[in-house]
Every structure is written in structure tokens, then in C-alpha cells.
Amino acid sequence: MVGVFLNFFYWLCSICSTNSLEMEREEPTPSAEDPTYGASSSSTSPSAGDYGGGTKKTKGDNYEVFLSFRGKDTRQGFTDHLYTSLVNAGIRVFRDDNDLRVGEGIAEELLCSITQSKISIPVFSENYTSSKWCLRELTHMLKCKETNGQLVWPVFYKVAPSQVRHLTGRLGKSINARGEKLDEMVVKEWEKALEEVGSLKGWESEKIHNGFLTDIRETCARKGIECLQNQLIYDILRSTYDVSNAEEGIAVIRSRFTSKKVLIVLDDVADNTHLNCLAGDRSWFEAGSMVIITTRNKGILEEATASHIYQLKELPSDQSLILFSRYAFRKDSPQSNYDIISADVASTTGGLPLALKVIGSFLCGKRKEVWKDTLKKLKKVPHIEVQEKLKISYDALDSEDKQIFLDIACFLIGWRKQSPTYMWDACEFFPAKGIEVLSLLSLIEIDEGGKLVMHDQLRDLGREIVRQENPMEPREHSRLWNYKDAEDVFDNSKGTRKIEALCFDKSDRGRSYTAEQFKELANLRFIQMKGGNFTGDFHNLLPQLIWLQWQFCPSDFAAANFHPKKLVVLDLSHSDISENWGGWGPLKFQGETETLSQWLVFLEILILKECMRLEEIHSSIGDLKTLVSLNVGGCRKLKELPVGVGKMENLRELILDGTAIREISISRGCLTKLENLSVWHCEKLAQLRESMGSLVSLTRLNLSQLWIEGLPESIGSLKELETLNVSGCKSLARIPGSIGHLASLSVLDLRDCGKLAQLPVSLCSLTSLIELNLAWAAIAELPESIVNLQNLRILDISGTHITELPRDIGMLAKLQVLRAWGCKNLEGLPDNIAQPTSLKYLDLDKSGISGLP
């Protein structure tokens, strides 16, 4: 799916840049959430009512692309990725999701959007012709093509152009069904439009081999060009290679790609070496192939004799002011007494979206004197110096917040914020406050999964700040994120007390690091490495080490007295360790009788994920009084946990996914601080104990894909539980009535519970419930009292045996999504189904319903 999307996305980018094939990479335009780029999730239409998935058309806007598609076929995959990425690439897109609209008239606003667009893109899928909206839009697109010269670029997504042209298969059946109910002239007009568009040059999803290499500059610096060559080879050939050097990689690409028509995207190419190693010559690929390059260095494109070059434009002044105001004032325009200075600041940033966002966030709520000083600083910075403009916000941070920002920029992008939070807390950086400040200033973002996200320009700013600590001597840098710099320091014994954090990111399982090489690194607090080993006597070394991430560590362990006393985070995932691993001895002060708890005095995070040989964990782990998170997910041979784990006082997260554990031992009155418990796909776990009710702080419980027959009655005691996932439990036949006591529950997932035929009446007492998923359960009816779920927004009954909906279901005032796909026994809807004004999405496809009330 991702490959299909990328393939078309970059093909379209070339069209929107007047058939450009290469783009010079500067600042990306605002993201899909920015108002000036028409990315709102709903649209108000004079004759169509409210519907989700459209794009709000503001007066005077002209769009480059009008995107029409059958939502249920492509919304969650191809089209959604396409839309978001086109917006981020600076292409102004009007997205019309016809599935979500109600009413009969096609809005004047919608026709205007098609007419004013430079390009119209109908995304043909197998259900496209079952929508009258799609067909009406298509007809208007072709009229605009004929009268205005508009480009119409069809996408044939898992259908062939001939199927569209000749109306074969499901496409033909759908339009024939329409023809029985509509005017013959209208249907003929649609058939003519389909025949015409099926003959146009378009894009087919199934014919091109594609490769997409992101962030080449960063990846190459950290992992080497060979890593990128291996990825490209896999993307195109779908077979794994492990090239050992760049020349070998070139030979494989040049010889194996010659018979392939490819579309290759090389994102953020920093120098010609990258290009020469990945796509050095047109003769490497079959005729008709395309290589798209994004770069900040126009010279690379010129030297490569690029066919077309497209430079992304800055935002115009009016849109710059809107974007700036969104972050400075939390609305689309400045306050009345700030309108002049706001226009000055927005103008001075040079139309760079990231700078507008960061500077706007920095000035939000500040006194006017701060605004004036900031404007003076901006005017001193040359127009092209983006980093200097961004640095204004960094300079305003206090010292602890700066340390957090630099750690993220150098090492922690993409990490869940939890683990580094404990490290920063141990360093007295006050992470709760620091993360909030950085987020408010738009210097970082936290995504839906709780991961740390940072724009690459801000990442580069952070790393440049570290480089400037001593531009000529990496050993004087506080952080070494580039493995070449780190290895140079170690190979030449250049380590100094200045180094606080380093990364050996490039996997080298045969390399060893000696105690002597660490001798001068007295302030090292962070090590990130893959493979390798430690040798020598580490007595009194690494006194400040707080974070040790040693993935793929070997089964043998050669170091002595390796016991960093201040360790807070220990990650040994994907390693060959077992209960007899040689490293456990040194970590427990080899030759003495100390337990884990006596050397890991401060340990809070222990990650042993995907350690395939691990069958047993030392019993003394239960004595780790400070442990907050234990992750042994994917340890397939692990059959039980030490009894002491069930007695831990401070444990907040326990991940047991995919292990061979048969039971979860929880001592009553213990694990009272546990917030997240996940036992997904533990095939040997067939029963849950009543003692689970003692987990009074639990907010997330994942029991999916277990062979349990029921939930314990004590589950009703989990008053703080917010998310309960029991999906895929094929043997689950009963839900206890006590579930109605879960006052905080907002998400209940009972999807694919094939033996669950009845819901307890008490379920309707869940007043906080927002999402209820019953898809493919054996449920045959919904209780009438479901209308009591007044906060319910999403209800999914797809594939169930339900024959009718409760007659008062229209009283669910906040319901936004109702999915009844494949409900073959459902033959009608209540008259008040349209009563909830919030309802945006109604999916009745493949149900027994033949008409609407």
C-alpha cells in the first residue's frame, strides 16, 4: 500500500511542477492541519449539509488539485496518504469524500472547486461507479477539460483502464444498477465520460517497481550508504541483500535493475556520492523509469543533468500571516493592536512555514516589548539563514530545556517520550516542564503514539549547536551521534570528559570496546549501540551512565566489573542473552552474592524485547524497588515471570506480548500503580485470575488474541481503566456484568470475538464510552438501552448478525461514525437515523439494506 501511494505521489508532484522530475528541497509547506491549505476535516455546503472528509473552500482560493475518490475503497490507505503528502509538499488540494455527504444536490461550491483546479484526479477503484457523486464530479471534470483545458489525470487503483472504458466487472454492474433508477440521458452521459477517461493517459497502481529512501543525508551519516543500498534493493527486488561496501551495492543495482521499470525517490540527497551509489546512471534502469531527487543543494541536480528542476516556493504574505496568527494568537488573524507588528514579523520570516510556526509559538502570550525585540533580531538575520531565525526560540530556553532539546535532536527522534523522561529526571532536567515548553514553542511534537517528533530543520539546528561547541574537534562535543565521529574518538583514544552521550548506531557485531577507551569518559550518561562487545575491567568506570541501549548484544560477555551504578534505562532487546548470559555475572558484581537489586539501585526501565533465547528471568528482579517499566514482549521461550514481579510496588508498565506465559501472578494489594498491562497474543494464557481486580491504577489493558473464555468478575474494580482491548479472542463467550462499573472506560474493543453472542445489560452504564467495536462478533442484537451511551462517537457492528438497530438510536447525540458493513441480516434503519447532527460517516455496504428511510 505504501509503495503504491508513493509511486503516484511523486509522479503527481512532477506534474504539479509543470512536468518537473526533480525538486529542490527547501521548506515544506504547512501540514494538513494548517487552515490555509484547506485541510479541515469537514465542509459546510449550502445544499449538502455537513459531512466529514471534505476540504473547506475559502472564498478566493484556487486549488491546484481536485481529488475525487470512493472513500470506502481508498480513504484509509492510498488516498489519505496521497492527500496529506501532497499538502505537505506544497500542492494545494481539494479533497472531496463523496461517501460522507448526504442530500441530493451537488454544491455550487464543489463545482467551483473543480473548475478552478489546475488538475482533477479521479481515483478509480472497484466501487467508484456505485457513487452518483463520483460520476457527477467526473462528468464536470471532463467538461472543464474540454472548455478550459484542465488536466484530468486518472488513477486506476486495482482496476484496469479497460475495465473503466468498457464497464466490465463490478464497475459495469454498479452503473447498470444505477441505470434502472435514473434518467437514461444522465446514465448515457456517465457512460460516455467513463469511456473517455478510460482512454486517457493515467497511472496504474500495479505496473511499476518503486523504491523510496527517506532522509538520505541523516541515514547515510549514521548507518552508511550500504544501509540505503540494501533498502533500495529490497524495495525493488523484494529480496534481501547484505552488501558489504558501496561498490558491491552499485554492482547489484546496476545489474539487477536493468530489466525493471522503476520509480525511485531519493529524499534529502546531500552530495553527489549518494546519488552515484544509488542511481548513478540512466542506463541502470529500463526505459521509462523515473528517479526523483529532493535536495537542498541545487548543484547536485545540475551536475546530474536533471531533466527538470522545481524549486518549492515560499508562502505569499497573506497566507504567511494566517499561518503565523494560528500559532501566535490561536486564530487566523492577529489581535487588533498587534496587526501591524504581526505583519512585520510574518514578512521578515521570509514565508518559511516552519519559521512562522516556531516564531509564532514563541511569541504567543508574550508582552509587546518581547515582540519588538524579536522583530529586531529577525531583521538582523539574512533572509536565507533559516537556522538563525529558529535559534531565537532556542536561545530563550532555560538550560535544562536546552539539554532536552539537544538530546532529542541528536538521538531520540521517534522514541516514545516515556523512557527518556526517566533519564532526564535523573539528570534533574525537569522533563515534564521541559517537554511542555518545547511543545508549546513548536520545537517538538508528541504524536498520537506518544513518540517524540522533530522537524528536520530543527534537528539540524540542534546538531549544529553541538558542533559549534568545538567545530574542529568532535571529542570536545557533548554529544556524538555520528558513528564515524564516535569510532574515530574511540579508535584514537580521544575520549574526554566533555562527552555526555554517544551512539554506535551502525551495527558491527564483531567489534569490541575496551575499558581503556572509556577511561576518560567520566561524564558519559548515554550509550546507544547495536552489536559489539565490552572487554577489560570496568571497575570504577562509567560512574554517570544513566542510559544503556545495547541491542543485538552477543551471548558471550568479556568485560569484568561492568556495573554502572546510576543506570536508569537498560535496553538489551533483540539480543542473544539467556538466563545463563555471561553479562549477568559482571552486572551483579561477579564473584560476590549481590542480587540485581543491589547494583541496579536506580533502574526504572528494563527492556528485554525479542530476546528469543531467554527462557527465565532471575528471581531477584522482583526486588527492583524502582522499576517502572518491564518489557519482555516477543521473548517466545519465556514461560513464566518470577513471583516477585507480581509484588512490585512501583511498576507502571508490564509488556508480555507474544511470550509463552501461562498465567499472570498478581498478589492481592500489589501492583497498585500499574497503568499499562499488555498480554497480546500470549497463546498459552487461557485464564485470568480474579486478583487482576487489584490493579486499581490500570488505564490500558490489552488482552487481544488470547484463548480466554471469559473475563474475571473482578474486572469491574478497575475504576481507572480507559481502554480495554479484547479483540480476536476466539473463545470469549461471556462478559461479566461488573463491566458496567468501569466509569472511566472510553474504548471497548470486542472485535472478532466469534463466540460472543450477547452483551451484558450493564454495558449501557458506561457513560464515558466513546468507541464500541463489535465487528465480526457473534452479536445478534443491541440492547435498547444503548441510547444511554451519550458520549458514544464510534459504533462498529460490521459483520455481525444484528437484524435491526434500536429504534431510538437517533438519540445518540454525539455519534459520528456508524459502520454496519457486511451486516447481511440488517434490512432496515430506524426513521430517526439521521437525527444525530454529528453523524458524519454511515457505512452500509454489503448489508441487507436496500433503501434509506
Image (cartoon, rainbow, N blue to C red):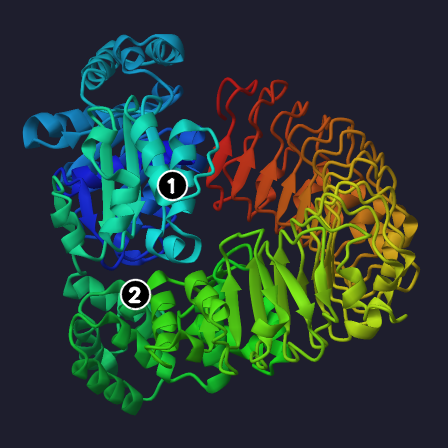
Q: Is residue 425 above or below residue 587?
A: below
User: What's the residue at 79%, 49% (across, down)?
Assistant: 740
Give x and y (percent) for residue 236.
Answer: 38, 30
Q: Amino acid at mark 1?
A: Gln
Q: Can you identify the residue that label 2 sits on?
A: 354
Q: Which mark is residue 229?
A: 1
- Within-10-Å neighbours for mark 1: few <14, some 14–19, many 20+: many
Disc 2 is placed on an element classified as helix
How far from the left and from the top, in percent, is residue 120? 21, 33
- Residue 433 left/right relative to 679: left
Q: Nearer the viewer, mark 1 or mark 2?
A: 1
Reading the chain from its start, which is encountered first: label 1 or label 2? 1
**Which residue does the image show at 44% across and 42% down from the upper left?**
244
Quadrant position of residue 536? bottom right
Label 2 Cα crowd, 10 Å radius (few <14 / some 14-19 / many 20+): many
Q: Nearer the viewer, residue 44 or 728?
A: 728
- Left or right relative to 325: residue 815: right
Q: Quadrant of residue 348?
A: bottom left
Residue 66 rendering spot, x and y as whole percentages = 24, 38
Q: Looking at numbered disc 2 in the image, what kind of residue is underneath it?
A: Leu
Q: Nearer the viewer, residue 732 or 516?
A: 516
Quarter containing the N terminus? top left
Q: Quadrant of residue 31?
A: bottom left
**Position of 257 relative to 471 (above/below):** above
Q: Which mark is residue 778?
A: none
Alpha carbon distance from label 1 to label 2 = 31 Å
Left or right of 824? Residue 853 is left
| Foreground residue among 80 and 621 | 621
* Residue at image location 56% in from the left, 47% down from the top: 813
Label 1's element? Answer: helix
Measuring from the top left, give residue 336's x and y in whole percent: 24, 79
Q: Are marks 1 and 2 in contact (CB under 8 Å)?
A: no
